[in-house]
Amino acid sequence: MESNLNKGYEPHDVERKWYRTWEANGFFRADESSVKPHYSIVIPPPNVTGVLHMGHALNNTLQDILCRWKRMCGCEVLWMPGTDHAGIATQNVVEKQLAAEGSDRHAIGRDAFIDRVWQWRSESGGQIIQQLKRLGASCDWERERFTMDEGLSKAVREVFVRLYEDGLIYRDNRLINWCPRCHTALSDLEVEHEDKRGHLWHLRYPVVGSDRFLVVATTRPETMLADTAVAVNPEDERYADLVGKKVLLPLVGREIPIIADSYVDKEFGTGALKITPAHDVNDFDVAKRHDLPLINVLDTSGNINENGGSYCGQERYEARANVVADLEMQGLLEKIVDHQNAVGECYRCRTAIEPYLSLQWYVKVGPLAETAIKAVQDGHTRIVPQQWEKTYFDWMFNLQDWCISRQIWWGHRIPVWYCEDCSELTVSREDATSCSHCGSKDIQQDTDVLDTWFSSALWPFSTMGWPEQSATLEKFYPTSCLVTGFDILFFWVARMMMMGLKFMDDVPFRDVYIHALVRDAQGQKMSKSKGNVIDPLHVIDEFGADAFRFTLASFAAMGRDIKLSTERIAGYKAFANKLWNASRFTLMNLEGFDPAAIELDQLELSDADRWILTRLAETIDQTRQTLEGYKFNETASTLYAFTWHSFCDWYIELAKDALYGDDPQARHRVQCVLFTVLEQLLRLLHPIMPFITEEIWQALPGSRTSASIMQATYPDGAELPIDRAGAERMELVMDVVRAIRNVRGEMDVPPGKQIAAVLDCKTAAAVAVLQAGAMAIRQLGKVGELNIGVGIARPEQAATQVAGEVEILLPLAGLVDLAEEEKRLEKEIAKVQKDVDLFSKKLANEKFVANAPAEILEKDRGKLKDAEEKLAVLRESLDKIRALK
RNA sequence: GGGCGAAUAGCUCAGCUGGGAGAGCAUCGGCCUUACAAGCCGAGGGUCACAGGUUCGAGCCCUGUUUCGCCCACCA
């Protein structure tokens, strides 16, 4: 016997070979002129600086499963790939390069720096795209986009100008989040808060014209240099007499007023709050109410500036230490209390951010959010799992205006020009050469760039050619589904919703499927610093892409984090190997077989055939349903169970008799069924395991209607003969086999040893079923002499088991001793007795009988009857054994 | 401070609109049976976190408690 397949499955060459073939033949290509129904997904564009991590692997595996499945279902599928220019992250990478060369971006200048970034991108950017290919991602790579592409830049300009014209973009001078290391403003979302142990310093401010002190509590003593007032709660009797007076600000010598404002919490600290309007958001608001001056004591690097007097030039934490020391020396430090509070950090470099007063551009999100909320409320976009809707709404309802300007160089430059002559703004889709107000040529473009997420927000339509009314948009917008992790629900999903609705007048996607985050086996977030990162590429090397994908799919239950372990992946590698070997077996036995001759309805199918075909039909049904509902883990386990436990464990074993026998008709019949089941199974598995299924599918005999399994149709079970009665008959045969195996196993009968069996049936129908299945019983139960009948002659000493209406009697002679069988029976009886007790108690309950649905009652009555009958048989058998002892 | 989620076998997790607790791995026993030892056959293992409640019936629904995890938030 031979087959074209190697003995064990070796993924590497197979993966490389088929991926190349698919790509070279354009199988990933989407055709906008197709008349087929559309299915489209835009990839969450990974950062151009990115390397494939587990999050990407999961995210893209799920997308690929959907895309391959929908393609096979007859859809015209567009999976739009690309990368994100990742402003700050990418700029940081290139700045590090420059630093290594002893240079920096200011030394080489803006234009040269931008050139360097592009150079970096062409050399080492986008390696993640190659890595996605190793995963098997079937993106339409010919359409690959980059958020800094010309087309996408045009879209960005268009959106900026239109939002400006609609009054939804404005410039304002406010306290923003400033990163002193990146030297840029950040949106609220880009600031991460982490609780840290710190201190609360109690400082004494001398009250002018008295010998009293007003004690303020602060977490940031160095900012006292910029205090312009001290505030107390108007209800606070302790300080009522001080309101309107002044304190002398220590170290600085400035007199500042004591004011009353209800913002101050009497209970916190001392109840007196130093007001530092230029360095605290709340203080800023208080200052506005009381018309207080703003004093900024920090520069853009977080050092004290010239307003900080003698502390000028000191780094902020250095200044803090010095301020505290100086106050202490002057007896103005009352005490230091331990205190925990949340410090805002830059999400890119973890530097503590400063609230910093500056002029920035904002998007007014109110009106945009309103439509985005309504779209979800009205069901135009469905969030799956639905629990995330609440999070989405909560965030949308509390949205602050979005700060979109960044003081970095790498990104979409803000299309605004300032006139030196009339100081008006020119906001333009094209690069402006003159002021749109006075015509002056003396204009300067804004030096800032846009938040990276501004261009990402346009991704679903900018990648499809917008602002042109392209055929791609026509065919594929709105997209069918967005697959993403919840970590970017706010950053990205919410903003795409707003922009899509604003500019396309329709939601960007029908479904948003939110998947879990991947963690390590201990449930920790994977991170380089923790050293617990599992590299997807190593996993692919070691276990193969298919095993990896299957693992991810089977872990992708909704609403829970994924704890990934390599043990689990190894298990699915074994699964791939199992499929491989089952295929080898099938191919070995299909020599000279022509699948074109298969006509299932012309064959005299055995119960085993009916059973496996019916099981296949059920599997098809479940597979389609679970994929439709994004229940990837259920898809995986359905297919796993069918492949291993139905097809391999039973059907292949059952098939051997006919395959090795000398009845050509039986052989042909089994070949037809084997081929049918394997071929459809491969198609069912293909979305999850694209490589191995293609390799095997191509090795099948006969010719296919399509060149690749990718283009074959997804099974729908239409042509399968579903025969539940036949399947049930087979289940009885299987139960008998299991019962025989159980006794053999329990009594340690060597597997090689043949035994005799007597099957005493209650009905002639059962006899017929078992006679039809006699060969299976002999083969799988290793039974030699087999007698089947109603009220048949029974052996004197026998081990007894019961399967439905069949008593199974295995003559003990020479096999085991009576004591063994007695023990086994006692155990079995105890088990069945429990069932009898349970159901008789249940059915004795009048309320249960009165209230439970008839269907349940009937089921339970049947179960009780079965258990009682089984119990009687086993007891009788036990009595006999005891009598014989 | 608000919100969300989790707690089920030794481990990792499924468990649908409430109807006799499941899988994989691990463990134990037996097998190199002509697709597969990356395998085959069998077995053991659970007070479904705790306390109440609703119900004929609760892992599932309700209330409270405990322990973890995450997200959001301008109390110095």
Image (cartoon, coloured by chain):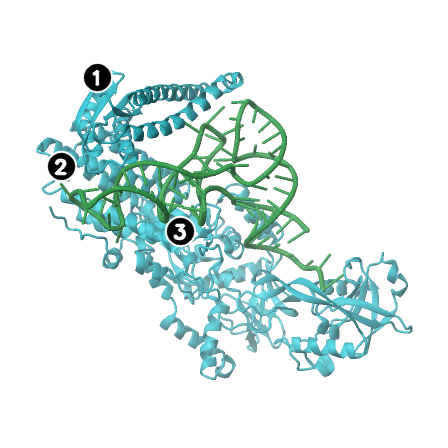
Q: Which residue is mark 2?
A: A659
Mark 3 or 1: in front is 1
Asked where in the image residue A742 lies, by quadrant, the reply is top left
Looking at the image, residue A485 lies above or below residue A180:
above
Mark 1 vs 2: CB contact within 8 A: no
User: For the point 21% across and 48% down, which residue is it?
Assistant: A696
Q: Position of residue A406 (x, y in %)?
A: 55, 68
| Three-letter residue code for mark 1 | Ile
For chain B, give the colour: green
Kindly state the secondary structure of the residue where label 2 is placed: helix
**Relative depth, front residue between A216 and B53:** B53
Q: Is disc 2 surrounded by few (<14), some (14 to 19) or many (20+) residues within 10 Å?
A: some
Dot 2: chain letter: A
Q: Which residue is mark 3?
A: A41
Asked where in the image residue A57 lies, by quadrant, the reply is bottom left
User: For residue A792, which numbered disc appears in the image?
Assistant: 1
Kindly state the secondary structure of the residue where label 1 is placed: loop
Q: Is residue A680 left or right of residue A296?
A: left
Residues at marks 3 and 2, CA–CA distance in whole angstroms: 46 Å
Q: Can you tell which chain is drawn cyan?
A: A
| Three-letter residue code for mark 2 | Leu
